[in-house]
Image: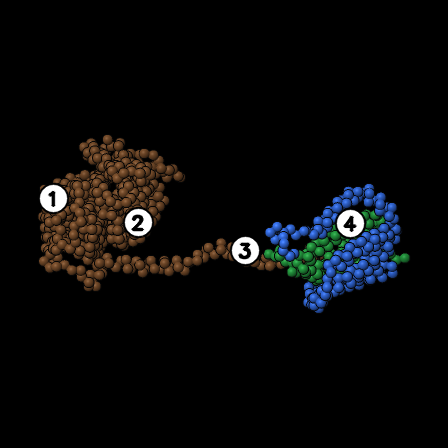
Chain colours: A blue, B brown, C green
Amino acid sequence: MQLGFYIPAVIAIISSILVITRVNAVHALLYLIVSLFSVAVVFFTLGSPFAAALEIIIYAGAIMVLFIFAVMLLNLGKEADVEEKRLLNFKLWIGPGILSLILLIQLFVILLSNNTSGIESQIITPKEVGISLFHKYLLGVELSGLLLMSGIVGAFYLGEKKKKSRHRFFQGENK
Amino acid sequence: MLNLLWIVPALPFFSFLILALFGRRFSLKTASILGAGSVGISALFTILIGISFISNPPENFKFVQTLWTWFNVAGFNPSISFYLDPLSIVFIFVITFVGFLIHLYSVEFMHDEEGFSRFFAYMNLFVGSMLTLVLADNLLLLYLGWEGVGLCSFLLIGFWYKDPANGAAAQKAFIVTRIGDTAMAIGLFLLVANLGTLNINEILTQAPAAWSQGSSLATAAALLLLGGALGKSAQLPLQTWLPDAMAGPSPVSALIHAATMVTAGVYLIARTNTLFILAPKVQELVAVIGAATLLVAGFSALAQHDIKRVLAYSTISQIGYMFLALGVGAFSAAIFHFMIHAFFKALLFLAAGAVIISLHHEHNIFKMGGIKNKMPLIYWTFLIGSASLASLPLITAGFYSKDMILWFAWSSPKGSTILWAAGLFGAFITAIYTFRMVFITFFGEQKTEISHTPGKLIKVPLVILAVLSLIGGFIELPGTLGHLPLFSGFVDKVLPSVHLIDENILQEGIFQIIAAITALAGLYLSYLFYLRRTASEGKTALHKFFYSGWGFDWIYERVFVRPVIFLANINKSDFIDLVYSGIAGTTSFAHKILSKTQTGKMRWYAMGIAAGAVITITIIVFL
Amino acid sequence: MNQVTLEISLALAGVLFIIGLIGVMVRRNIIFMLMSIEIMLNASGLAFVAAGSKWMQADGQVMFIFILTMAAAEVSVGLALILKIYSRFKTLDADSLNRMKG
């Protein structure tokens, strides 16, 4: 048994479940970061240090931080009360629960019907990743660049606060 | 000369086209010249052709002018061809000549009506169709003319279309005659299927060869053709449309419902006489129907108070006489009576029309009276027409024609005493109701003022027709009075003549005297009842029964009309339409259901994606 | 040592994915839905890396980089949208934003 795999696996699952059941947004985000860390450890076990590092630096370190900043910007107040009410609604969980359970069972059935060999623990170095990235998948890199730029432009435009322009007739009134 | 035969029907058709297309822009004068003139020129040509035919007859007394082949399908190729023989000459003479006089009359009669050129267009179309009917070489062309005159009858009865009652009368005429037309069409199908041709001459030669006397095919064909004749000629049981058809203008009643269209049935039976001779039971039926009709209509005429309805029932009755003659085999007598009847009935209708418009469009004879001296010419012409209708002896043409029919009803091998007695009694009733009409309308106190007196164009046709009603009979003098069978000699070249059981001049003379006495007795009785006493509209049940035409309308209403309306009401929402509205309904129902899936909520869509994924995986992997 | 089989890794990825799916379907707050989507993306990235590691190629990690990039772009735009929605509708309830309903 690979402990290095199973413990982070369990932690990831538990923290993910906690993410989706929390009331407070920031609490949920923190649990999400925990989940991401444990997945990074799983990456290490699978012999992909580069992916693990990236996961921590970018996913947990940048994206989640962005998330937290945005949530804080929202300045939600006593929203927790309203959320709690909805949480208590157990009936909501039944439908999605059943659907997802079926999906999970199907997935397991598919997976367990194959008998393949195990993963040889050979570490794939960042150098290999880099070579593959900039040789085989160069086009993908360029496209990612385009994607990121469009993301930036979109975010920039959406974040703009439009100055409310009033007709000069109404200029003197209170905003 | 005979080659100009095609002009006779072509001219009215041509005039109809011009009037129909451009009539609105014509002045009254142009339209009347075109309308009446075309029929007049046709009459002229008819007279010339007739003279040429009589003086220099073609072989077998038949002349065929083929214009073109109509169509050619599977060996059946009817052609547009006109067939001239003594029978059709008599008919086209009556149609064009009497038609021309009526057109002249209409110029003045319809002078103030709107739709003047429309009227003449329809009248010309009618004359053209009727000429096609009688000149047709094959039964298909005859049927074309048949339908054409039916259409024109509909158009002209409902001429004053703004009043819905006129439209209803026109519809009734069309629908009732349609029943007969359908029977005739089926008869034509039968003939084509069995004999392969509808050419009249070929049918008349092939049918006796193919079918034996009294065979079921011959009986069926003759019966179906008889059905068509009954419809057009308004005999029992399809006679209910003619009294209501009086809603049209008087010239229309004169032309269509007295002289020509209603005699189309007589023409049909006379033309296809071989078929009827092949089916003796049907011929008997023709005579019986004729006798029954003349009595029923005669009694009904006794009780009417609208002057035109009296004349309408009188027409039904007189055509009954013609059918009686056809039924006993006296074809030439029937045609002779047709010609004389056309003269005096047209005269009566035209004179009645003149009376009506002179008295502010008053139709009720009980509101007329005492105009004998105020309108002398109309009075005398009406009197002459009525005398001819009542067949007053010796001086009127009606006497000769009706007497001929009565004699043959007795003496022909297919005749019988009952038929003769019915005809005689009918003559008695005819005299009574005719003179009832004369006395109430013209004698006594005047109840309505005269608004205007008629002009020349009305008077001249009346005079001409009156003269013909008097002297027309002299071309066919019976054996007792000098034996001058000009007419029957001419027509018998193509129609079978009657072979009497025994030709007994004395017997014929006795019967003539009986007929003469009957007519005079009717005149005297009517004088007693209607002139001496003041006439009144009786309100007894018997009177009402006769007034309603022996209740035929009542029966038809209950047996035919009401069930159909009931069924139509059940099907009001048209259950076949349910298929289409059902499709639309199902579609909108499905739309309502499907539109509920567009909730606008994101979670719902996410659920949909998840469910879709589950189902897809299930199908692909596990099935 | 015993190896970690590919199936187990994929099973883990599947479980995480399902959890994320449940989160999307159940939570009404938009922020939580976005978070659940992040969980799902992470799970798919795990699947890729596991597959690449099995075949001992760098392709899995390269795909993971691309996924990461995409997640970053998506989060930035998504959060900007959320801020806009909040300032416009004054609520973060996804169910109340149903003006597109048919």
**Residue type of the residue flagged with mark 1:** Gly
Q: In terms of depth relative to the viewer, which is nearer, C89 or B602?
A: C89
Q: Is residue A173 left or right of residue B56?
A: right
Q: Tell me the quarter of the picture where residue B570 sits.
A: bottom left
Q: CA distance from mark 1 to mark 4?
A: 128 Å
**Residue type of the residue flagged with mark 3:** Thr
Instruction: Give the mark, 2 or 3, whose residue is nearer the N terminus.
Output: 2
**Secondary element at tag 1:** helix
Q: CA distance from mark 1 to mark 2?
A: 51 Å
Q: Are marks 2 and 3 in contact (CB under 8 Å)?
A: no
**Residue type of the residue flagged with mark 4:** Thr
Q: Nearer the viewer, mark 1 or mark 2?
A: 2
Q: Position of residue A122 (x, y in %)?
A: 88, 51
Q: Position of residue B423 (x, y in %)?
A: 17, 53
Q: Nearer the viewer, mark 4 or mark 2?
A: 4
Q: Which residue is mark 2?
A: B161
Q: Is residue B594 left or right of residue B237?
A: right
**Secondary element at tag 3:** helix
Would you call the spot at circle 4 few (<14 residues within 10 Å), some (14-19), or many (20 or more)? Answer: some
Instruction: Give the mark, 1 or 2, whose residue is nearer the N terminus.
Output: 2
Q: Position of residue B132 (x, y in %)?
A: 29, 40
Q: Which residue is mark 1?
A: B479
The image shows a total of numbered marks equal to 4
Would you call the spot at circle 2 few (<14 residues within 10 Å), some (14-19), or many (20 or more)? Answer: some
Instruction: Give the mark, 3 or 1, whose residue is nearer the N terminus.
Output: 1
Q: Which mark is residue B407?
A: none
Q: Which residue is mark 3?
A: B587
Residue at mark 3 shares a chain with residue at mark 1 = yes
Q: Are marks 3 and 1 in contact (CB under 8 Å)?
A: no
